[in-house]
Amino acid sequence: MAFALGNVSSALASSYPLLMIARFVSGLPHGAFLGVAALLAASLVPLRRRTWAVSMVLAGLTTANVVGVPVTTWVGQRLGWQYPYALVGVIALVTLVATRRWVPPQPHEGQASMRAELGALKRLQVWLALLIGTVGFGGMFATYSYIAPTMTTLGGFPDGAIPVVLAIYGVGMTAGAMLAGRVAQRGVMRGIVLSLVAVAMVLGAFGFAVRQPVTAVLVVFLLGLVPSILVPMLQTRLMDVAREGQSLAAALNHSTLNIANALGAWLGSLVLSAGYGYEWPSRIGVVLALAGLVVAGVSVLVDRRRGPVGGPRTQGDPERLSGAP
């Protein structure tokens, strides 16, 4: 409801300050909504399919970007800037009605409280999982933040081709989210480690592959695909280690991705400001991905010393929720 009201208010804003306030209100529910939606989706399927359920929520998000951004841009160009906000507000209201109509009610957990949620922050594994996302995913943003000038400068693409390049990236993101559940079947921590290795490899090849049109398109697709496999598994990992603080941890996962966005873009700007070429942000990304891999390794070692997360419930489960490589 807050998201719907924020967008409708944006469409009706009569001044720039009012528009900024409305946009702030629209952004407030973001982390909480996606976190709770992931928890809800996971609760509706068998334990072994939790990562798949979370990946479907995130696949919806990436599909919305692939379809929604060009559609609302087209609407805004032809009807005015207010109409995309109004359209999004209407879609939010329709979603609210559909949720009330078709999503089964969930039993209230009497022990849930703000204190219990904050208690999750006392656990080392929660912080390690959040750090994996912040550092490991920052490498993708170090590259993606400068994708347009990289494609035109190194790849020789005309400005008019950039929307197509971004669409290819979006298709890769959607495909990655859908593949995450299958990757997680061999163990969530194993999948996280392998995904970080793959991210480092893609970023390492990016600066070379982007110089030829065919390989540039392929590496942009992989840039969307591989990191998107990682996110649902990080969400599942947080659900495992947070215990009674799952709602807060799930919301924090998306906050860490926003921090990763800022961190990656900032580090990429430093190397560009230092006079290096557009192939260098991806090389900074390799360092970030490897740093995330080190953090994941620490998390695995902590697991092995303390025993697997989740206790007997996870034993024999195909998703192997705390499985280490």
Image: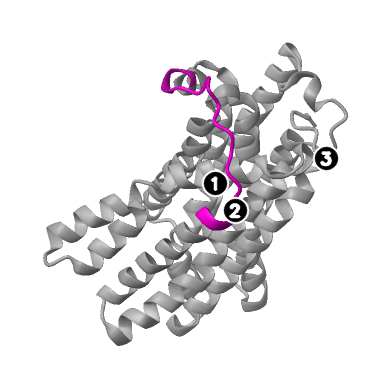
Measured in 3D between alpha carbons, the distance from the residue under mark 3 to the one under mark 1, in whole angstroms, is 24 Å
Residue 248 image position (x, y, % from top left)? 48, 31
Mark-to-mark CA distance, 3 and 2: 21 Å
Q: Vertical placement of 129 versus 20: above or below?
A: above
Figure quadrant of the C terminus: top right
Asked if residue 39 shows in the view, the reply is: yes
Residue beneath disc 3: 186
Nearer to us of marks 3 and 2 is 2
Q: Which residue is mark 2?
A: 57
Q: Quickly name the residue at label 1.
A: 37
Q: Write the start and end of the magenta stretch as one range.
A: 100-116
Residue at (43%, 81%) from the top-left corner?
159
- Pointer 1 or 2: first along the chain: 1
Looking at the image, is 305 positioned above or below residue 294?
above
Question: Picture coordinates of residue 305 (x, y %)?
Answer: 73, 12
Which residue is at the far right? Answer: 316
Amino acid at the residue labelled 1: Ala
Under mark 3, the amino acid is Arg
Secondary structure mostly taken by the magenta-highlighted segment of the chain? loop
**Residue in the picture at 44% in, 40% down:** 255
> CB under 8 Å between callouts 1 and 2?
yes
Neighbour tally class for label 3: few under 14, some 14-19, many 20 plus, Cα within 10 Å = some
The answer to whether mark 3 and mark 2 are in CB contact below 8 A is: no
User: The residue under label 2 is which amino acid type?
Assistant: Val
114 inside magenta stretch: yes
Could you say whether the residue bearing mark 3 is in a helix, strand or loop? loop
Quadrant of the rendered image containing residue 169: bottom right
Q: Earlier in the sequence, mark 3 or mark 2?
A: 2
Badges 3 and 1: C-beta atoms under 8 Å apart? no
Residue that appears at 55% across and 39% down: 133
